[in-house]
Amino acid sequence: MGAFDWFWKAMGAQGDRNDKRSRGLVDDAEARAEELSGLDDATLATLARQTVDDGAITDKATFLGILSVASTRTLGMRPFTVQLQAVLRLLEGDVIQMATGEGKTLVGAMAATGFALTGRRVHVITVNDYLAGRDAEWMAPLVEFFGLGVGSITEDKSADQRREVYRRDIVYGPVNEIGFDHLRDNQITHRDQAVQAPAEVALVDEADSVLVDEALVPLVLAGSEPGMRATGQITAVVAHLEEDTHYTVDDDRRNVFLTDEGAHAVEEALGLDSLYSDDNIATVLVRVNLALHARALLIRDVHYLVDEGRVQLIDASRGRVADLQRWPDGLQAAVEAKEGLAVSDGGRILDQITLQALMRRYPMLCGMTGTAVEATDQLSQFYGLGVSVIERNNPLARFDEEDRVYATMKEKNAALIREIVLIHETGQPVLVGTHDVAESEDLAAALQERGIEVNVLNAKNDAEEARIVAEAGDVGRVTVSTQMAGRGTDIRLGGADERDRAEVAELGGLAVIGTARHRTSRLDNQLRGRAGRQGDPGLSLFFVSLEDDVVASGGAGEEISARPDADGRIDSRRIRDFVAHCQRVTEGQLLEIHSQTWKYGQLLADQRVIIDERRADLLDTDKAWRELARRAPERAGELADLDPAVREQAAREIMLFHLDHEWSEHLGLMDDVRESIHLRAIARETPIDEFHRIAVREFKELAQRAVDKAVETFTRVTIDAEGVHLTEQDLARPSATWTYMVSDNPLSGSGNSVISGIGNIFR
Ligand code: ADP
């Protein structure tokens, strides 16, 4: 298992101990549930509160027992023993691993209710809007049983509605909505304007995808300010370059490099002496690089779609259109230019935060996922979280076949189609997991040619997701999907209402077929997990070719001798081990990129915490007034007759305006530095050290500069009974703001290698 062997063992040992202890407790809880089941609702609710003292649960068995009775009574679901175990582990702050279909929704709601009963507000972080709404509504009777409030934050809710929901005890919401609200709350100038209320606990569904895969995705709040860079001319020049002559692409198609010949060609076309002169590096060369990235590495229908004149990113980890995502500005513009579209305005970045920094704001974090074990070291390293594996309620009856390995892609695809046809002829439902939109469409077309009707689930038809997933277990159904991770509904045998359940079970349940191994085994397991729900029969099987991305980049340069049969199949243990080895290599590469990107983000995250604290101080105290009055006593004297509250608020608005403005400038500057750092740093320091040096230097002066500017404004601006008139000094906040996620996420799995290339620029 490699370098983390010892670590996994250590975690496992701890897991065992926890397991034994919690099993005893859960046995007691079930006994208590029996005893308590005769009591009426009100008595039980009171009793639950009596088992809590000063925020701590004094009698866990009784507490769990009551939750169990409440669930049975309000939702008609009597929690399984394993579910109670899971609730216990969550309450202790672990990430639990629980397979698909084992009932995580109920587990999460019971744990959230438990936390709320100890007086802590909980945010339940869901995969998407739809699930936030569904789960909050579904679980409400359980929560309300105890006199607690629950609600959901969804995109369609107004600020007032959100404000009301955030004050409830349990709040369901997708991570981006909660993050965007946090960012907007960091622009307010009076506490009353805040939408969010403090929460102590975050309980994260699909914890590995939010906390690990997407951890470094920044959520951005931008304000209107025109002036995007035009890239048309550069795009045109780059369009004429040829691969291998003018530029080279590395093996895993993650980085693109201009050759000397390419550099000359660009210089000539643009009439420049040298791309690498100090004048040109930060401007022209950066843009040439971005245009080259867009040209050589970003592929339409794999990484993005063009729809209604807009570039729409495909979220590789979900295989769907990522409505709210943009690439970093320069790259977004480069892709738009490449497609001949109007270059959109990225606006001015007002504030940004990564999901990781957002999650670390909660004093307590816990989570649930079907695939936590493989993310154990990241969860521990980045959040100090432990993983608890919860056993299945019914033993797994899925058969996981060994990989079928073929020499070439062509032979693999032929075999894949033969296998699907074969299984389909028996009537067994088949779910095929592909890696991108283009592949899903090609495969669907090939199957349709053979007269097989196919349901396709990919970024182009998200809206039908719920229906397609619900039908995926029908007799004779063939479903071709891109990434299944985060598609939050489970597949029931014999249809959503399980009408043909017995027949499908007889046929062997759902057959899941992977068209290639993913970049991490965790993603493979997410796909496998779609079959074999709650002890259902099922099958999982992956097809692999030695030409697959994972094998090519993970096994870079390694020669392997193998003797394929007539169909191109190589049936040997050694070759399967080699494939597994390649996957471990790519996992290691991803980890390395992650930690590199993390290094860039961490300093800014730390700086943001400082800004956050300073803001809170200015909002909640009269410090702004006191500081300005001390620095400009004369001006303060002139305002002596004003209502102190008006005066203080005026000072607050002035100070906050300049603090926010300087922070926004800082983010903009560091963004530029990051894009050009690898070019600038050549022959000087390592890029990361250079980046840190600049970030620290600039930040040091930020606070002081903000105060100096505030003093200057304070002495000049009109302040009267109505407050401060900032607009008169052209110091207005942006009239419109919008939010988006930057997609440069190196870990979001397959088909996303290019975007990780952006991360790689930093190396
Ligand atoms: P997961 O999120 O773990 O994949 P879900 O929360 O969607 O699973 O639950 C899967 C199904 O199991 C749901 O239809 C739910 O109603 C059912 N379920 C969960 N727990 C119980 C229980 N204790 N008793 C009966 N049905 C349950």
Image (spheres, grey):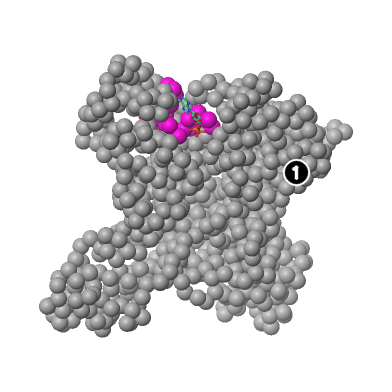
Residue 434 quadrant: top right
Residue 493: percent from the left, percent from the top? 61, 27
In this view, the residue in front, 571 or 440, is: 440
| Residue assigned mark 1 | 443
| Left or right relative to 291: residue 575 | right
Residue 374: percent from the left, percent from the top? 53, 36
Give the position of the N terminus as an image quadrant. top right
Residue 515 quadrant: top right
In this view, the residue in front, 112 or 715, is: 112
Is-magenta flag for residue 84?
yes
Tell me if the residue at label 1 has its CB under 8 Å from ligand 1. no
Mark 1: which amino acid?
Answer: Leu
In this view, the residue farthest toward the right is 566
Q: Which residue is at a point 28% across and 71% down the rendered structure image?
A: 653
Q: Which residues are magenta?
A: 80-107
Residue 17: percent from the left, percent from the top? 40, 24
| Vertical relation: 194 (above or below) 440 | below
Residue 16 quadrant: top left
Element on which disc 1 rests? helix
In this view, the residue in front, 11 or 566, is: 566
Give the position of the C terminus as an image quadrant. bottom right
Is-magenta flag for residue 511?
no
- Decide if residue 310 is in sight here: yes
Residue 560: percent from the left, percent from the top? 77, 39
- Decide if residue 676 is in sight here: no
